Image: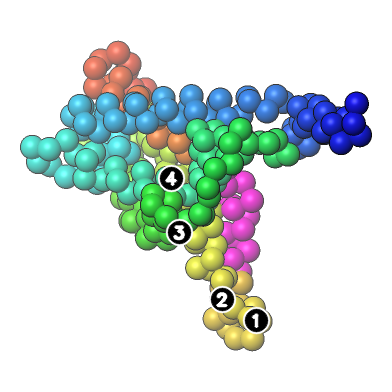
Amino acid sequence: MAISEQAERTDRATREVVRNPYSVLPNWLYPTFVVVALSAFGLYAAWVVFLQPAGYFAPYLSPFDSPWIKSGIPPGIFVAWAPLAFRLTCYYYRKAYFRSFFWHPRSCAVNEPQRGKYRGETAFPWILNNLHRYAFYATVVQVAFLWFDAIVAFDFGGRFGIGLGTLVMLVNVILLSGYTFGCHAFRHLAGGELDCFTCSRTARVRWRLWKGVTVLNVRHDRWAWASLVSVLLTDVYIRLLMSGVLHDPRWIS
């Protein structure tokens, strides 16, 4: 056997057994989880946005329908584009769906099945990822409405109260805020393009803001998944109340 052929076989065998150096889990597990989770959420979101009435059970409003625009069109259509665009262009989710749906690559130190031609974010549709900052602006507006909805959820016919739905909505908006304001785009807005953090009062303020955003940013993936699940559970809870399947425990002053 030629030395070059033997070396090639050895190299091939080495590539076949190489594993992700950052995890003991199988390389296919994380991509499979992402595909299943995002596909299931996407199907549920499409069902809610296009086929269901507004998720409202006083005083609770589903995050899919906030702000509630009353018309003959399902209200989710008017607002769902903002969080959709934000998550699709999110730095973390881009990594997640590239590795999972396209196996590009599916894990660290694992070869791709087919490299193909990659031009980064200079060609359609990936050039749209450059709109992430603008999607962030739109999402901030929606998160503000969600905070308003969470405050309204303490109002039971003009009386202060707390229901299980109140807590569900409050946890949801906290998780969404952690995800939104831990965004890489916001981190850049807070402290980017500065040569000196201590040369002026404005720079020092931006440095402190940047440090705060960084605390959220280092766990951006966890905020992303936690907020995705909380949006789903909040909507499910409200719709179960609407259908009479669940009863909302409440304390009212």
Could you tell me how many numbered marks the image carries?
A: 4
Q: Mark 3 or mark 1, which has the lower sequence index?
A: 3
Q: Mark 2 or mark 3, which has the lower sequence index?
A: 3
Dots 1 and 4: beta carbons under 8 Å? no
User: What is the C-alpha distance between the residues marked 3 and 1?
Assistant: 31 Å
Task: Indicate which label's residue lies in the foreground, 1 or 4.
Answer: 4
Asked if residue 218 is among those painted magenta in the image, a careful observer would answer yes
With respect to residue 166, does 182 lie above or below? below
Asked which quadrant contains residue 154, the reply is top left
CA neighbours of label 3 inside 10 A, class few (<14), some (14 to 19), many (20+): few
Q: Where residue 252 sits in the image (x, y, percent)?
A: 33, 32
Q: Where residue 200 sits in the image (x, y, percent)?
A: 60, 86
Dot 4 lies on which element? helix
Q: Mark 4 or mark 2, which has the lower sequence index?
A: 4
Determine the residue located farthest toward the left in the rendered image. 72
Q: Which of the two residues, 98 or 60, is positioned nearer the viewer here? A: 98
Q: Mark 1 or mark 4, which has the lower sequence index?
A: 4
Dot 2 lies on which element? loop
User: What is the C-alpha distance between the residues marked 2 and 3?
Assistant: 23 Å
The C terminus sits in image quarter? top left
Label 2, on which residue? 193
Q: Which of the two residues, 229 or 12, is positioned nearer the viewer here? A: 12
Q: Amino acid at mark 2?
A: Glu
Magenta span of residues = 208-221
Task: Indicate which label's residue lies in the foreground, 3 or 1.
Answer: 3
Label 1, on which residue? 196
Asked which quadrant contains residue 230, the reply is top left
Residue 87 badge? 4
Q: Mark 4 or mark 3, which has the lower sequence index?
A: 4
Label 3, on which residue? 122
Task: Indicate which label's residue lies in the foreground, 4 or 3.
Answer: 3
